[in-house]
Amino acid sequence: MSGEVFQTRTREYVKPDLLLRTRRSVMEAAHLMHAKRTRHRRHAGITLLVVAGLLVLFAPALWSAASDLTTGEHFFEMPIIVVTFSLVLLAAMVAILLTTWKGSRRGASEE
């Protein structure tokens, strides 16, 4: 038997430079996607918190306006008009928020 058969061959697996660059770019893209997702969740949470806070602030005024209207006051009195105007603005803010979310999700799915 020859001595070459029993020699152990150690292979060094050297990763080519191209493989390392690809791995780095994929890991960087994954990190950016994760950061973007986290930022989007944070912004959505803050926005929902603000809308809920505004709704809580407007709830007593809405209740008062409904109570005034049921007891016989007219719709064109100043407190009722102010509450109605405030509720219209709140509804407009919610509509803008929904269209922004719909647009951001559409843009994220196209990327």
Image: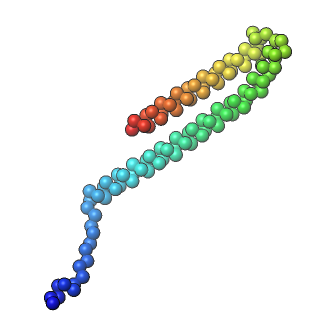
Q: Is residue 77 above or below residue 105?
A: above
Q: Residue furthest left?
A: 2
In which quarter of the view is residue 14 placed?
bottom left
| Number of numbered discs | 0
Q: Is residue 78 left or right of residue 27?
A: right
Q: Is residue 57 left or right of residue 1?
A: right
Image colouring: rainbow
Q: Is residue 110 above or below residue 11?
A: above
Q: Residue at x 76, y 11 (%)?
A: 75
Rendering coords of residue 29 (x, y %): 39, 48
On-image quarter of the N terminus: bottom left
Rendering coords of residue 17 (x, y %): 26, 59
Q: Residue at x 26, y 56 (%)?
A: 18
Q: Considering depth in this image, is 3 or 35 the residue closer to the camera?
A: 3
Rendering coords of residue 92 (x, y %): 60, 22
In which quarter of the view is residue 64 placed?
top right
In which quarter of the view is residue 60 placed?
top right
Q: Considering depth in this image, is 58 or 10 the residue closer to the camera?
A: 10
Q: Residue at x 28, y 64 (%)?
A: 15
Q: Is residue 40 left or right of residue 2?
A: right
Q: Residue furthest bottom?
A: 1
Q: Residue furthest right?
A: 71
Q: Residue at x 70, y 17 (%)?
A: 84
Q: Considering depth in this image, is 4 or 38 the residue closer to the camera?
A: 4
On-image quarter of the C terminus: top left
Q: Is residue 12 above or below residue 109?
A: below
Rendering coords of residue 2 (x, y %): 15, 88
